[in-house]
Image (cartoon, helix red, strand yellow):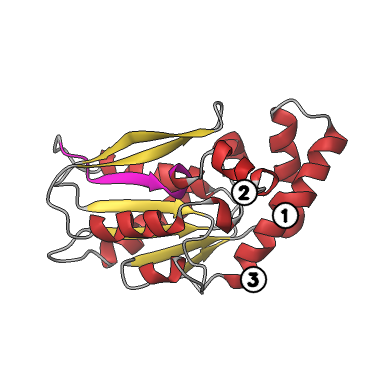
């Protein structure tokens, strides 16, 4: 059950709280692994545990740093959207590193799946919020620029269902977007699954590794 994993992550965060800097936690995994669902649930849990008006935790997804479709089309990368080179990885890493020490309110982009684009300044991080949970596919990749955040994360979590389960979820995701089952499967095999295999193969070992199936919790929110 997801509740058990949420508690495990919250306990990990509690044990890794930083002094003098903001505590930044990475939740990584391949597409459709359930990391967005878990990360959102963790932030909600942390915020229900405190009575202050200031959020105890804020979620900053990597997806907000998708390059715009026009940029991807110009570079011939639109069909590869979701691959590492289709993100502003350098900008993302710089923004997360700055969150460690910033003492002012900061704003971050959020990806809108319906519109298929990033919305600038859609996420506000309060200067007094002590924990930021970051989630995304490539947070633990052992290559630049992603590994430049190795010393920033107070703790890391990796979610990795089987490739068979990921294929089913990815196909169902495209079906939910209106594609027939065969086209949905082709899309998953052509781009999403290679990205998933790359994440699993090239990510560093996390402090906590999970393989829980979050289907019952609502996989339509997972990414």
Q: Is residue 196 magenta?
A: no
Residue under the image location 69 percent in, 50 percent down:
192
Q: Position of residue 86 (x, y in %)?
A: 56, 51
Q: Position of residue 164 (x, y in %)?
A: 77, 55
Q: Which residue is mark 1?
A: 193
Say whether residue 165 is left or right of residue 134: right
Say whether residue 59 is left or right of residue 162: left
Q: Position of residue 119 (x, y in %)?
A: 41, 32
Classify 199 as above or below 129.
Answer: below
What separation in Å lies between label 1 and label 3 (alpha carbons)?
A: 12 Å
Residue depth check, mark 2 versus mark 3: number of the one nearer the observer = 2
Residue under the image location 81 percent in, 42 percent down:
185
Q: Which residue is mark 3?
A: 201
Quadrant location, the C terminus: top right
Few, some or many residues within 10 Å of mark 2 (<14, 14–19, 20+): few
Q: Which residue is mark 2?
A: 75
Decide which of 97, 132 is in the foreground and name it: 97
Q: Position of residue 31 (x, y in %)?
A: 61, 50
Q: Secondary structure at mark 3?
A: helix
Q: Which residues are magenta?
A: 54-64
């Amino acid at each position: 059950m997801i509740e058990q994993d949420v508690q495990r992550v919250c306990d990990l965060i509690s044990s890794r709280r930083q002094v003098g800097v903001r505590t930044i936690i990475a939740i990584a995994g391949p597409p459709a692994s359930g990391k967005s669902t878990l990360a959102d649930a963790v932030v909600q849990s942390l915020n229900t545990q405190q009575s202050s008006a200031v959020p105890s935790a804020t979620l900053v997804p990597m997806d907000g740093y998708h390059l715009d479709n026009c940029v991807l089309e110009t570079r011939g990368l639109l069909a590869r959207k979701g691959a590492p080179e289709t993100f502003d990885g350098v900008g993302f890493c710089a923004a997360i590193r700055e969150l460690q020490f910033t003492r002012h309110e900061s704003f971050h982009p959020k990806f809108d799946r319906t519109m298929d684009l990033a919305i600038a300044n859609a996420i506000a991080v309060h200067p007094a919020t002590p924990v930021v949970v970051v989630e995304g596919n490539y947070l633990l990749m052992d290559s630049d620029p992603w590994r430049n955040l190795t010393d920033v994360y107070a703790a890391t979590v990796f979610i990795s269902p089987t490739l068979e389960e990921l294929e089913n979820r990815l196909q169902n995701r495209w079906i939910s977007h209106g594609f027939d089952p065969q086209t949905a499967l082709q899309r998953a095999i052509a781009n999403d699954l290679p990205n998933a295999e790359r994440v699993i193969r090239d990510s560093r070992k996390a402090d906590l590794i999970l393989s829980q199936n979050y289907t019952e919790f609502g996989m339509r929110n997972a990414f």
